[in-house]
Image (cartoon, helix red, strand yellow):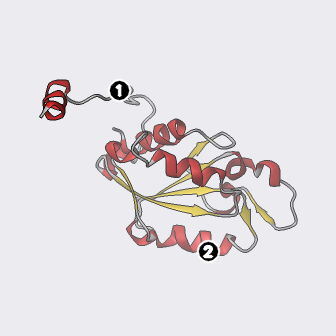
Amino acid sequence: MGLLRKIRTTGRVAEPAPPRPEGQVQPSARQLGGSVQVRCVDAGSCNGCEIEIAAAFNPVYDAERYGARQVASPRHADVALVTGPVTRNMAAPLRRTVAAMGEPRLVVAVGDCAINCGEFAGGYGVEGAVADVVPVDLAVPGCPPEPEAIVAALRRVTGR
């Protein structure tokens, strides 16, 4: 009984949420209603960004509390988180994935490689940056970007 009493008297222990991103909210946040379904697409990365995206959705950073939820199908997604430089073999699948998403849709380029090809620039198998293949609405810089930056970008999308 001592443990239950301690849990009851201590209550919830968590850090307060950072302030809301008032001036930086994406224009389509109102259309999305404060909640988005996220589809992650690896267009040819080294998997560093995918590890950080997984960390952003784990219980420590908990992107779901700000209205972002991962889904498996692009048909259910509102936002595409695209990582890595787009390889020649992934250019057409990336276009099809974004085309399968409903309107309004947003594309977020995650990491330096997705923004400007990073270390892979000039590679024989690289088609280009994500913006060269599909229109990009938001970019998250870093190699790899920290989970806090990914959560901040998702908060800009949801407006929460």
Say what secondary structure mark 1 lies in: loop
Which percent across, then down, holds residue 57? 44, 49
Is any part of residue 26 visible from this angle? Answer: no
CA–CA distance in space, label 2 to label 1: 40 Å
Q: Is residue 33 left or right of residue 19?
A: left
Residue 103 vs residue 44, the one in the foreground = 44
Q: Write the residue at 42% across / 37% down.
A: 25
Q: Which residue is mark 1?
A: 15
Is any part of residue 104 visible from this angle? Answer: yes
Which percent across, then down, holds residue 16? 33, 26
First of labels 2, 1 by sequence position: 1
Q: Write the residue at 58% across / 51% down.
A: 51
Q: Residues within 10 Å of mark 2 (few under 14, many from 20)?
A: few
Which percent across, then down, holds residue 74? 46, 69
Which percent across, then down, holds residue 105? 45, 59
* Circle 1: residue type: Glu
Q: Which residue is mark 2?
A: 93
